[in-house]
Image: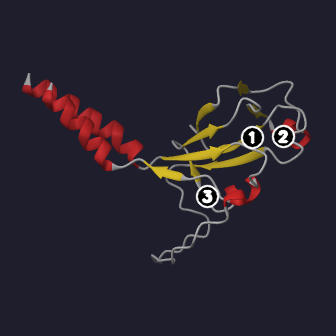
Amino acid sequence: MAITRAIVAVAVMAAIAGLANATNFDVSWDLSTNYTQWVSDKTFRAGDTLTFSYTSSHDVVEVRSSAYATCNATNPVSKSATGNTIVALDAAGKRYFICGIAGHCTRGMKIEIDVVTASSPPPGASPSPSVSPASSPPAPSTAPPSRTRTTAKVALGVVLMVLAL
C-alpha cells in the first residue's frame, strides 16, 4: 500500500510539475481593450491557457487566419458564448480569436496569439539575468487583463492529499 501511494505521489508530482510553469492569461473580452497592445508584452507557451471573461453581448470564436483578417465568423474552428471560456494552448503556432457579434471584430475585438514551444526563451531574452523595475498599472479603460501563475504550492498540496489516502 505504501509503495502504491509513493508511485501515485511521484506520478502526480511529475504531472503537476509540467503545470507549475504554465500560465493562465485572463482576457477581459470587451470592446474597450486594445488586444494588439495587450499581447505585445506577453509570451504564450504551449501548455498555457486563456480565460476569456465576457458578458452575454459577446462570444469567443476561434477562426483561421483568413477569417481573422476579414472578421468572418461563419466557419469557425470553435465557438463559445458561456461568458467564461477557457482555451488550452496545447501546441506551438498561431491561434486567432474574434467576437462573432456583428461589428465587434471590426471595432477591434480580435486577438492573435502566437504560441511558442514550452521551452522557448521569451523574445529578446538575453543570456544574463536582468531585473526590470515595477511599473504602475495603466488607466482602467486600457488596463491589460491580469495574469496568474500556477505555483508549486498547489503541487505540494495535491501530493500531500494523495499521500494522506
Q: Which residue is mark 3?
A: 42
Q: Quadrant of the N terminus?
A: top left
Q: Quadrant of the C terminus?
A: top left
Q: Residue at x 74, y 52 (%)?
A: 33
Q: CA distance from mark 2 to mark 3?
A: 20 Å
In the rendered image, which quarter is residue 88 located in?
Answer: top right
Q: Which mark is residue 55?
A: none
Direction from residue 157 to residue 139 in the image, left or right: right
Q: Which residue is mark 2?
A: 68
Q: Mark 1 or mark 3, which has the lower sequence index?
A: 3
Q: Mark 2 or mark 3, which has the lower sequence index?
A: 3
Q: Where is residue 69 shown, x and y percent of the image?
A: 88, 43
Q: Where is residue 9 shown, x and y percent of the image?
A: 21, 33
Q: Residue at x 48, y 50 (%)?
A: 148
Q: CA distance from mark 2 to mark 1?
A: 6 Å
Q: CA distance from mark 1 to mark 3?
A: 16 Å
* Amino acid bearing label 2: Tyr
Q: Nearer the viewer, residue 57 or 110?
A: 57
Q: Residue at x 56, y 62 (%)?
A: 122
* Amino acid bearing label 1: Tyr
Q: Which mark is residue 96?
A: 1
Secondary structure of the residue carrying tag 1 is strand
Q: Residue at x 29, y 47 (%)?
A: 153
26 versus 64 height, above or below: below
25 versus 165 height, above or below: below
**Quick one: which residue is furthest to the left in this view?**
2
Labels 2 and 1 touching (C-beta < 8 A): yes
